[in-house]
Image (cartoon, rainbow, N blue to C red):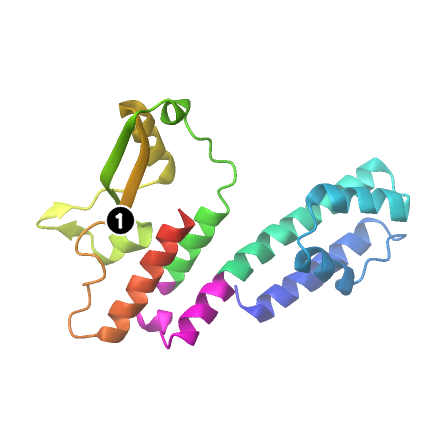
Amino acid sequence: MSPDEADMQLKCTHATICSTISVVQLNRSVLQGFVKYEMPFSSTFHLCLVLQHLSVNVAMRIHTILASLVATCTAINITSRILAAAAADHINLYSIPVASDALASIEAIYKMDNVTVPPGISSGNKLDVHAHIIPPFYRILVPTVGGVQVPAWTLEAHLDFMAGVGIKHAVVSIGAPGSVVFPGSQAKAAALARLLNEFLAAV
């Protein structure tokens, strides 16, 4: 989502809140303040109750809207940070065709706050020193390796595997051939390497 699209969503959210209950005079600066200072959702809920003297139903409605807005802006901030860091290093992430898919995949990992770590991991006694991660956008670029189809990978499935065989810790890396997908193009190789590293960092 671009900054302009994010700004438009902020406007729409403000309009939705004001149409939900007319006595609430929330302006865009207030909404931006919630996001800027990363106010916990519970705090926004209590703020609505205390300052606006709203009914619980109305406060919950506003709380839900704000929660959705903050989640969206969190994803926007992740993408913006990645793009800004790449630009500072003179890396054009959009030089490769899967850049948008890659950024969406990275955002999805950061937003997976409801992932449950299987209990078998905490009780495990093994260390996996050679585990591969296959981001979904990477499978688009590299569907097969050595004539064999690259398997699908998810964080949940990886954690389940670790728990099932008693692995407590795993050293992970991207599967072969890594960032060597665009022969002769240093710019594309750098862009892919950065996106793969950002995905690993998110995991």
Q: Is residue 100 left or right of residue 150?
A: right
Which region is colored magenta? 79-99
Report x, y in % for residue 184. 16, 74
Q: Which residue is mark 1?
A: 173
State the residue lying farthest toward the left: 146
Report x, y in % for residue 160. 34, 29
Report x, y in % for residue 30. 77, 60
Taking depth in this image into account, of 197 and 23 the one nearest to the observer is 197
User: Which secondary structure lies at badge 1?
Assistant: strand
124 lies above or below 52 = above
Type of amino acid under label 1 = Ser
Q: Is residue 112 left or right of residue 197?
A: right
Q: Write the residue at 27% across / 33% down.
A: 127
Q: Write the residue at 30% across / 23% down.
A: 164
18 lies above or below 149 = below
Whether residue 191 is in magenta: the answer is: no
Taking depth in this image into account, of 165 and 152 the one nearest to the observer is 165
Residue 4: image quadrant is bottom right
Q: Write the residue at 42% across / 23% down.
A: 119
Report x, y in % for residue 176. 17, 52
Q: Write the residue at 50% across / 59% down.
A: 78
Classified by dominant secondary structure, the portion drawn in magenta counts as helix
Residue 32: image quadrant is bottom right
117 lies above or below 72 = above
